[in-house]
Structures are given as C-alpha cells and as structure tokens.
C-alpha cells in the first residue's frame, strides 16, 4: 500500500507541475504572437523543439521574420541570445573561440581561452549554409554533446543550449549544403511560409506606425529547464510508441516496398519524435501525447532525414508526398 501511495503522490506531483508549466508556456506563446504575426505553426513547432531540448532549422525566403522570431524567443523565454552571420570566410574559431597568448607583468606567458558566440543559451546561426563545411562542422560537437573542445581542453556550454539556424531555399549560389550528419542534429526542419492576407494586413499596421510592439519576458532559463525535465517524465502510451516506430521504420529503404527512398532516418529520429510529441502535448495542456501528435509532427521531424531515389525524383515525387503516404498507413 505504501508503494501505491508513493506512486499516486508522484503522479499528483507530475500533474500539478504539468498544469503550471503548461500555463507558463502558453503565456510565452501568446507573448511571442504579439510580435510575430501569421506564423502560429512556426511558433508552435519552434517552442516544441526548445521544450524537447533540441535544435531547429528554419527554412524560408528573406523577410518572413525568421531573425525576429529568434530574437523574440530569446526575450520571451529569458535566454541569453547571440547571433552569427555565416559567410564563406567565417572560421571555426569565430564560432567556438580561441586561445590567446598572455604575458604577465613578471614576463610569464600563458594561454587564455576567449569564448566565442557559441557560448549562449540561444544561438542564431543565420544562413548557416553560407559557411564552408569546415566551419559548419564546428557546431557538430556543440549541438550533440553540449560542450566543445579547443586545444584539447573541454569547455561546457551554458544550459539550456539551443541552435536555431536559418536557410534561404532560393539562392543557392555560393552555398555549401549541410551534410547529413549535421542535418540529423536538428530535431526539426521548420518551413516558414508567407502569412495570409489578414496577418499581413496586421503586420502593415503594427510595424509601420510610430510605436512598435516589443516582446516581454514570460519565463526564464530555470523555468525552461524544469519544463524540459518534465517533458521527459510525461507518460507515452503503447499505441503512440508503436506509431512512432512504425512511421520511422517505414521511412527507411525497404526492398519489398516501392523504390522510393534512397536512405532514411535512424534511431535519432525516433528519439526526436518521442520527445516532440510529449512537448506538444504539454504545450496544449495535455498530460500524454496522442497518435495525432505523431502524425502532425512527422513531416518536420523526418523530412530532413530522408532522400528519395533518382527514380522517385524523376517521377516528380517529393519527400513531403512520401511522408504523407506513409502516414496513411498509421492514421
């Protein structure tokens, strides 16, 4: 009986914590929406990514408020935010930092580490595909392991640590496509599309007047870390787990299936989807995710982790089309 009572008390604690955190997250989402208009799905998926403890790749043409979104997120969530403009001449040390030789008044020399902009809680990597592969790879260890190594010495990054990178899908001249190993580090690829007419009308009035609406803090880093820990404690039903496994495994090459997929997502995609559906449930004020969460988040979690065969591309198939086809087997 004592064991049952302790389990019941633990469940009560989780319920109370979830209700409190959900309220704080909804307040943060509303605060972001007062500055960013017509991008509700983008805001939701970005918050889901951060609640999951992950990184996001924002894809959209210039002028759709991608940079403004990251800036607003930093203010609203109370995070230390830094921005790197990626260019072809950017070096790894411009991101990570470097050691410099200091000489004391007594003539003794020693190396001192000067931290780069990667030492931030929210890092915006603007036009990440503009930099060379060598510079892009400087973020790999940071994104996966939350620390970097410079001259053999380990330097831990602040917590939480999130990278929100942007890409322009149109102009590809002079760019370096992100390698698959780095794409896999992004929990989601989020498409930033044009706002609808009413949202764009609101943008005209809100941003061209004498006064501009400014973002307000709704959380801080400690509350965000508590929310991220809570996400990992939310229960997930067997049906949801089976849906995640079925979907991710179906997105891999299968000799018995149509010759559509050249390569597909690994177990990191399953982990990402498992965390994302929990975070989305918490954002909606629910205590457990559903299969609908899996279906809604399948495309942003999977599409950058897949490639189609030459035959499929020649037939005009696209990755979103294939993912929608795979979802019908579950939904």
Image (cartoon, rainbow, N blue to C red):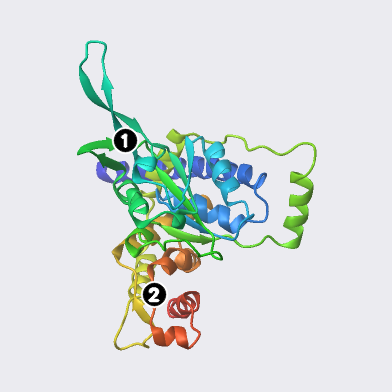
Asked if disc 1 and disc 2 are in contact, CB closer than 8 Å, the reply is no
Residue situated in front as seen by the camera: 158 or 90: 90
* SS label for mark 2: strand
Residue at figure coordinates x 73%, y 56% from the top left: 199
Residue 45 screen position, x and y as percent:
52, 56
Examine the rendering and report whether any part of residue 93 can be seen.
Answer: yes
**Front residue (pair 120, 2):** 120
Residue 77 position, x and y percent, is 52, 38
Q: Is residue 236 visible?
A: no
Circle 1 — which element? Answer: strand
In space, the residues marked 1 and 2 are separated at their CA atoms by 37 Å
> In the visual, does 40 lie left or right of 115?
right
Residue 66 on image: x %, y %:
57, 52
Pick out the residue farthest to the top.
106
Residue at the image point whose x is 35% and y is 61% from the top: 184
Reading the image, the residue beneath label 1 is 98
Instruction: Count neighbours of disc 2 (C-alpha within 10 A) and say few if under 14, some if 14 to 19, many if 20 or more.
Output: many
Please identify the quadrant where the N terminus is shown: top left
State the residue in front, 157 or 159.
157
Pinpoint residue 122: horizontal percent, then vertical percent: 46, 41
In-image side of 127 versus 40 (left or right): left
Image mark count: 2
Quadrant location of residue 226?
top left
| Up/down of 6 relative to 180, above or below | above
Mark 1 or mark 2: whose residue is earlier in sequence: 1
Q: Is residue 293 above or below residue 227?
A: below
The quadrant in which residue 35 appears is top right
Quarter location, residue 61: bottom right
Q: Nearer the viewer, mark 1 or mark 2?
A: 1
Q: Which mark is residue 307?
A: 2
């Amino acid at each position: 009986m004592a064991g049952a009572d302790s389990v019941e008390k633990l469940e009560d604690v989780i319920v109370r914590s979830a209700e409190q955190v959900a309220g704080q997250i909804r307040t943060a989402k509303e605060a972001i929406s007062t500055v960013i208009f017509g991008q509700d799905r983008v805001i939701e998926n970005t918050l889901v990514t951060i609640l999951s403890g992950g990184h996001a790749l924002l894809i959209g043409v210039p002028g759709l408020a991608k940079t403004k979104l990251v800036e607003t997120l930093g203010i609203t969530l109370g995070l230390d935010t830094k921005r790197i403009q990626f260019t072809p001449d950017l070096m790894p040390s411009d991101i990570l930092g470097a050691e410099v030789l200091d000489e004391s008044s007594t003539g003794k020399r020693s190396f001192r580490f000067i931290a780069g902009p990667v030492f931030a809680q929210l890092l915006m990597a603007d036009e990440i595909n503009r930099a060379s592969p060598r510079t892009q790879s400087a973020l790999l260890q940071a994104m996966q392991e939350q620390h970097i190594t410079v001259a053999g010495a380990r330097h831990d990054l602040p917590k939480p640590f999130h990278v929100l990178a942007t890409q322009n899908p149109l102009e590809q001249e002079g760019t370096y496509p992100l390698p698959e190993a780095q794409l896999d580090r992004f929990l989601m690829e989020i498409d930033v599309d044009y706002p609808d007419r009413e949202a764009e009308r609101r943008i005209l009035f809100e941003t061209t007047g004498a006064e501009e609406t400014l973002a307000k803090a709704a959380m801080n880093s400690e509350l965000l870390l508590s929310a991220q820990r809570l996400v990992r404690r939310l229960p997930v039903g067997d049906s949801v787990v089976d849906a995640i496994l079925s979907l991710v495994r179906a997105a891999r090459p299968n000799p018995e299936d149509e010759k559509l997929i050249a390569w597909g997502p690994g177990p990191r995609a399953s982990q990402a989807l498992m965390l994302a559906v929990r975070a989305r449930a918490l954002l909606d004020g629910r205590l457990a995710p559903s299969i609908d969460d899996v279906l809604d988040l399948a495309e942003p979690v999977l599409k950058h982790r897949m490639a189609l065969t030459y035959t499929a591309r020649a037939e005009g198939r696209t990755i979103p089309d294939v993912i929608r086809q795979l979802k019908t087997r579950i939904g």
